[in-house]
Image: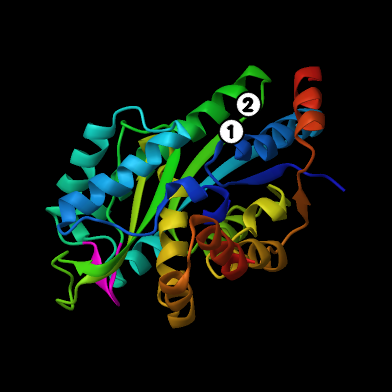
């Protein structure tokens, strides 16, 4: 059973580099390629505008900054992958997080989805519970949940 | 990654003396200095007030959430102030504001900031949550209310 096409769901924070590092190590061993996917959660900003907490002009700045940060983070991951001779594509999407990632997995025909710890994703009611759970359950391929920061760092260095 | 992970009892002003928006932001921002994450208090206040010029964060229900991403803070900060008399925040419903949350973030933490802002907005739509904050007698109690509603 070959794994040749791995999608990595990035959450954007510093910890979300861990699933990517694990995926890079795995891809190197399996001679697979990885695609890192970062999704800007439009629902949050849309809800904040609706609640009048955020105004349109402010939201435009947030989108711009989140895009810049998303690309910067993915470029870091790509560099890490290249340092281990692993091919890495970058995809930045906007929308409902789990829908966008599931869509990308289907579109790319990925045979494995790598994501971070559920407890990180499921830490806030309503906003995240659906995203983490749905991504886990609705992915059309096997899902690998990466945990144990120290172990992942050690494995990455070994590669 | 909950608001109660960031809001400390020292960051709660239970009886705001402020009567204006600017005074309220200053008073709550002053209570945030103790956590050591505010690098430049005056710039933080100015950045929050600058954001207010785009549109009032007096979102109705006697609540305001003045906020701004700013280099004047490290990480994410949140403070709470309660006013008995109410403050004119030019709120969308023209009501005076009694509950004020001042939030700031270093731009690098924008994603977390939006998640926490969204969570706060969600909590503040609950009438029992707002009532509990109105009745709280100490900063410690405010933090406990967050813990209870975020559980």
For the stretch drawn in magenta, the main secondary structure is strand
**Quadrant of the image containing the C terminus of chain B:** bottom right
Q: Which residue is mark 1?
A: A88
Camera-side residue of A107 and B53: B53
Q: Secondary structure at mark 2?
A: helix
Quadrant of residue A79 within the rendered picture = top right
- The colour mode here is rainbow
Q: Which residue is mark 2?
A: A81
Identify the residue at image location x=33%, y=59%: B15
Q: Secondary structure at mark 1?
A: strand
Q: Which stretch did the figure color magenta?
A: B57-64
Identify the residue at image location x=61%, y=40%: A16
Q: Is residue A73 above or below residue A6?
A: above
Identify the residue at image location x=71%, y=67%: A137
Q: Can you give x and y, in whole percent of width and height, for residue A73 in the image?
A: 49, 33
Q: Can you give x and y, in whole percent of width and height, for residue A103 in the image?
A: 55, 62
């Amino acid at each position: 059973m070959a794994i040749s096409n791995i999608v990595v769901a990035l959450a954007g924070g510093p910890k979300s580099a861990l699933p990517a590092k694990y995926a890079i190590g795995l891809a190197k061993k399996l001679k697979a390629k990885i695609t890192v996917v970062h999704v800007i959660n439009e629902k949050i900003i849309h809800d904040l505008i609706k609640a009048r907490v955020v105004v349109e002009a402010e939201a435009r700045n947030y989108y711009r900054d989140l895009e810049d940060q998303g690309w910067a983070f993915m470029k870091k991951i790509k560099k890490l992958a290249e340092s281990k001779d692993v091919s890495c594509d970058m995809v930045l999407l906007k929308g409902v997080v789990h829908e966008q990632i599931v869509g990308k997995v289907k579109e790319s025909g990925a045979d494995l989805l790598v994501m971070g710890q559920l407890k990180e994703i499921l830490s806030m009611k309503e906003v995240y519970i659906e995203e983490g759970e749905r991504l886990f359950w609705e992915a059309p391929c096997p899902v690998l949940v990466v945990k144990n920061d120290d172990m992942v760092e050690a494995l990455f260095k070994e590669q | 990654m909950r608001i109660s992970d960031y809001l400390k009892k020292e960051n709660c002003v239970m009886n705001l003396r402020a009567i204006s928006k600017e005074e309220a932001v200053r008073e709550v921002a002053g209570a945030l200095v103790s956590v050591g994450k505010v690098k430049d208090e005056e710039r933080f206040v100015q950045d929050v007030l600058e954001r207010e010029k785009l549109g009032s964060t007096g979102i109705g229900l006697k609540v305001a959430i003045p906020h701004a991403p700013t280099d004047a803070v490290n990480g994410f900060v949140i403070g709470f102030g309660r006013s008995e008399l109410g403050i004119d925040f030019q709120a969308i419903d023209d009501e005076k504001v009694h509950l004020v949350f001042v939030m700031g973030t270093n731009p690098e933490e924008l994603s977390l900031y939006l998640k926490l802002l969204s969570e706060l907005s969600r909590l503040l739509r609950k009438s029992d949550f707002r009532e509990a904050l109105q009745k709280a007698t100490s900063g410690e109690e405010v933090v406990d209310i967050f813990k209870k509603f975020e559980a």
